[in-house]
Amino acid sequence: MAATKPKSPLSISFGLVVALLLCVSPAWPQTSKPDGQQSPGMINGTIVDDAGAAIAGAKVTLSHDSISPGTEVLSREDGRFIFPKVSSGPYRLSVSASGFADRTLSGVLNSGEVSSLPLIRLTLAVGTIAVDVTSTRVELAERQIKEQEQQRLFGVLPNFFVTYDPDALPLTSKQKFELSWKSHLDPVRFGVVGIIAGVQLARNSYSDFGQGVGGYAKRYAAAYGTAFTRSLITRVLLPSLLKQDPRYFYKGTGSAKSRLVYAISRAVIKKGDNGHWQPNYSSILGSLASGGLSNLYYPAQDRKGVRLTFENTAIGIGGAAAGYLAQEFVLKKLTSHSRQSNGSQKEPTFQE
C-alpha cells in the first residue's frame, strides 16, 4: 500500500481560516418580499343604529388613497360586513344607509392582519327625524284612543269623549271618526236610543209618526239619526276641517272655583290640534247644522224653524256646560278605566 502524502502546512492553515470564518460570521441576510407580495389582510365589522339594533343593507365602501374607485359591500341581516383580501396600508371606510347620516372611518391595516372593528353606530338623519316623530305620535294617539274606548260610566255607558290626560296628543281625522263611530255603534247606545223612542211613543211626542210598531220605529230612526248626524258634524267633520279636538280635557287640579270656571267655559272654548285654546266653532256651528238637517225627517208640525234652531243651539251649549261640570266633579269617580293615558305621559303639548 502506498503511503499517504502528508498535507502541506499552507493547505491546513487555509482550511482552518475558512472554518473559523463560517463559525463567527452572521447569517446571510434574507431577501424580503416586495410590497406587492405582502400578505393580504381582512376587515370586518357590524353596523347598528343608536339603539343598538342591526342595520341591514347599509352600503360600506372601502377605499385607499392611491386606489379609486373603492370596493363596496352591503351589510347582512345581522348588520355584519366583511372585506376579504385587503391590501395593507392606510384605508378609509364610508358607511351609508337610508334614513341615517353617513359616517366615515379611517385606519391602517398591517400585512396579513384581521381587523375586527368596534360597532359602527349610525344616527338618524335630520331630514327623517320629523317623519319618525310624526309616525310615533300617531301611534301614541291610537293607543290613547284604545284606552278611552274602555271608559264607561258605571262600567256600562260609553264615556269615550273625555280624556284624563291634559297633554293628550291631537287626533288625526281618521282617529276622530274612529272614536265617534265606536261610540255610536256601541250596543249600549242602541239601547239608550230605544228607551228614548219608547218614552216619546208613550208621551205621543211627534204624533204624526203614529202609534204601534211603525210609530216606534220612526221615532227610533229619528232619534238615532239626530244623535248620529250631530256627532258626525260636531265631533268629526268640523273638528277635522277646523283642526279642533272634540274631547273634553279633564282638569282635576286647582281650586274648585278654577275648575268650575274651566268646565263651564269648555262649552264655548275648544282645544285646537296645535295645543292652543280657541272658540268652539265645531260644537256651535255643528249644532246649528244638525238642527237644520233634522227638519228633513221630523214631521212638518214638529220641525224647528230658524229661531227655534238657534234657541235649541243655545240650550245645547248650556247642556254641554252642565255635562262638563259633571265630568269634572262627578263622573270620573263613576267611570271605569278613568286614568291618565300611558301613551303620552312624557309627551309635551305639541304646538305648530
Image (tube, rainbow, N blue to C red):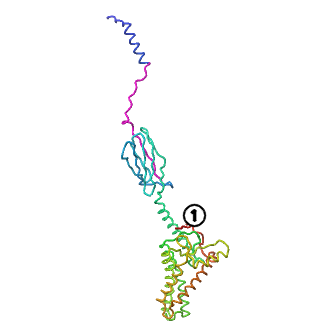
Expressed as whole percent of the image width and height from the top left, the position of residue 159 reads: 57, 77
Q: Is residue 338 left or right of residue 105?
A: right
Mark 1, other Cα within 10 Å: few <14 / some 14–19 / many ≥20? few
**Residue 26 drawn in magenta:** yes
Counting labels gives 1
Q: Residue at x 57, y 82 (%)?
A: 317
| Magenta-drawn stretch contains 167 | no
Is residue 94 in view?
yes
Position above or below: 284 against 303: above
**Nearer to the camera, 248 or 265:** 265
* Label 1 sits on residue: 346
* Image quarter in which the N terminus is found: top left
Tell me where residue 113 appears, x and y as whole percent.
43, 40
Q: Residue 133, relative to residue 251: is it above or below?
A: above
Q: Nearer the viewer, residue 268 or 225?
A: 268
Q: Residue furthest left?
A: 2
Front-lying residue, 162 or 311: 311
Q: What residue type is disc 1 on?
A: Lys
Residue 240: x percent and y percent? 48, 75
Compared to 288, does 91 lie above or below? above
Extent of the magenta region:
24-48
Q: Nearer the viewer, residue 174 or 286?
A: 286
Residue ID at (51%, 71%)? 171
Q: Is residue 210 visible?
A: no
Residue 224 in the image: state x and y as whole percent: 50, 84
Q: Secondary structure at mark 1?
A: loop
At 37% from the left edge and 9% from the top edge, which residue is drawn? 11
